[in-house]
Image (spheres, grey):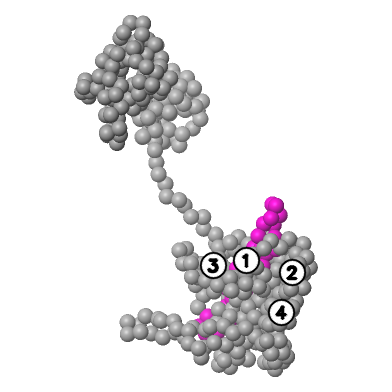
Amino acid sequence: MNDTALDSAIAIKLFIGSAAELPLSIEPELRYEWIADTLKRTKYLYLKKSEKSIIKSYIANVTTYSRAQITRLIKIFKKGHHLKRKKSTRNKFTKKYTLADIFLLVEIDKAHEQLSGGLTKKLLERAYKVYNLQAYKRLSEISISHIYNLRKNKIYIDKRRRFEKTKSSSVKIGKRKKPRPNGKPGYIRIDTVHQGDQDKQKGVYHINAVDEVTQFEIICSVEKISEAYLIPILESILALFPFKIKGFHSDNGSEYINHRVAELLNKLHIELTKSRARQSSDNGLAETKNGCIIRKHLGYEHIPQKWATVVNEFNTKYLTPYVNYHRPCYFPVIKKNKLSKEIKTYPYKSIMTPYEKFKSLPNCEQYLKEGITLSELDKIASSMTDLEAAKLMQTEKNKLFKLIFGV
């Protein structure tokens, strides 16, 4: 780096201003000599304080030394008008163990899957003393602590480095597949909605179960999703559907994919399936209903767990009947294009309530549970108009929120 023309604070200031973005650097071994030369050339010791500051900033930019280190070097320069880098006089231990010894240690550790220092030392001793392997002579005398020192060596680390793919933990509960109801009701999708935390206190959990074909929906609320609370509420949900349940599909959450739930469904001859990896649409229907039904009517605000029973009563008596008998839904009509690809459309003619969709199925009575008839369900559907059902649900919801939140 040739900067001999920069022989004053003014010249250096102008240079820094015009070449602020230029990278300035000098080899580490030449820095002391360059600093001394710069101080001499600019007559640093005779400059004003403001001019000295410019010189210090210039030296800091070029050498990357700290302000304190530059001040220390200037003090040394004042005494003898020169700077000299001292050679390192640090004592170094002679290396006893060679590269070949490290390779032998790597081999031992690989074969025995890296045992503790004491066990490894014993193996090294046995290699030399028992099996007379001369290559292990030096390592047979190594201390336990120094084994760990060698294991920190860069060469050892490079040789021992290994990468393993993440192993998926397979849970043999439920089949990982998308259910195919083939136009038949009884294949439900289920998901959990949490009503938020507040001050480290958990809120109510809503269990949302939706039939894929009819969109018939049962919503229940529970205080916790542990087995003691969840199993009874699942039994209640399965009982509230008017038709027979044949399939139970959830995501991979442990609240549903466990032995107790599997045992319950197996007893009822219901197939348990779970979402496939990287197939976000497998449980999409339940997640959509989480937003347009549960979040829309019960909101996002924290509801303490103690209100679970009251919320569940509202869901069973008012929200669930309104959703199934009085709230219309879009239903897809699937057509194939010229390339035989399935295209879903949602024509106006296909809009109907879940109960109307169920009644539109061919010979729908065959799917009903024993003891339940269409005439009974018709009475529920016709007991009030859609507007009356909606108003009743809103009135009871306001009462519920006033009880919980006091507003």
Whether residue 196 is in magenta: the answer is: yes
Comparing 30 with 281, the one in front is 30
* Magenta-tinted stretch: 181-209
Q: Residues within 10 Å of mark 3 (few under 14, many from 20)?
A: many
Amino acid found under the numbered disc labelled 4: Met
Q: Are marks 3 and 2 in contact (CB under 8 Å)?
A: no
Q: Are marks 4 and 1 in contact (CB under 8 Å)?
A: no
Please report whichever mark, 3 or 4, sits nearer to the chain's N-terminal start.
3
Q: Residues within 10 Å of mark 1 (few under 14, many from 20)?
A: many
Residue 393, numbered circle = 4
Please report whichever mark, 4 or 1, sits nearer to the chain's N-terminal start.
1
Residue 190 at what x, y percent from top left?
Answer: 60, 71
Judging by the rendered image, the residue that carries numbered circle 3 is 274
Q: Does 78 sit above or below residue 95?
A: above
Judging by the rendered image, the residue that carries numbered circle 1 is 192
- Name which residue lies at 74% across and 69% down: 401
Amino acid found under the numbered disc labelled 1: Thr
